[in-house]
Image: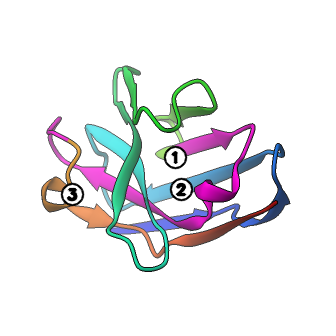
Amino acid sequence: VQLQASGGGLVQAGGSLRLSCTASGRTFRMLGWFRQAPGKEREYVARITRSGSTYYADSVKGRFTISRDNAKNTVYLQMNSLKPEDTAVYYCAASLETVPPTPGNIDYWGQGTLVTVSS
């Protein structure tokens, strides 16, 4: 099983980025994103079930949109109105079951993609 993430980069505050993550090897009930800023713990961002139900952390609600293409086994994170505090390494995450979004419940992680938001 492999999760391949892409789409990070440098953007000015107020700008947008779209992250993608393709899973290979099997399908997952839940796909999502976490992020980790320098010196901080990894935190949950958003998740989506195979049926399309979406959930967000309060810090990104209304600005980020998660979606998935089951045929491509790919999850996306559209990030709008980015803020400097969104700067972090973003990790794609996959779970075999629909479980609470804590790092300990994640079965597979992607390699991370850096998002830098300048002020």
Q: Mark 3 points at which residue?
A: 106
The image's mark for residue 21 is: 2
Considering the image in quadrants, where does the N terminus appear? Answer: bottom left
Q: Which of marks 2 and 3 is nearer the N terminus?
A: 2
Q: Distance between the residues labelled 2 and 3?
A: 15 Å
Residue drawn at (55%, 67%) of the image = 88
Residue drawn at (36%, 44%) of the image = 31
Q: In this view, does 111 lie above or below 10?
A: below
> Seen in the image, is 50 located left or right of residue 113?
left
Q: Which of marks 1 and 3 is nearer the N terminus?
A: 1
Q: Is residue 78 magenta?
A: yes
State the image coordinates of residue 84 (x, y, percent, origin top left). 69, 58
Q: In this view, does 99 lie above or below 110?
A: above
Secondary structure beneath label 2:
strand
Are the residues tagged 2 and 1 within 8 Å (C-beta)?
yes
> Which span of residues is magenta-colored?
75-100
Which mark's residue is nearer the viewer, 2 or 3?
3
The image's mark for residue 74 is: 1
Q: Distance between the residues labelled 1 and 3?
A: 17 Å
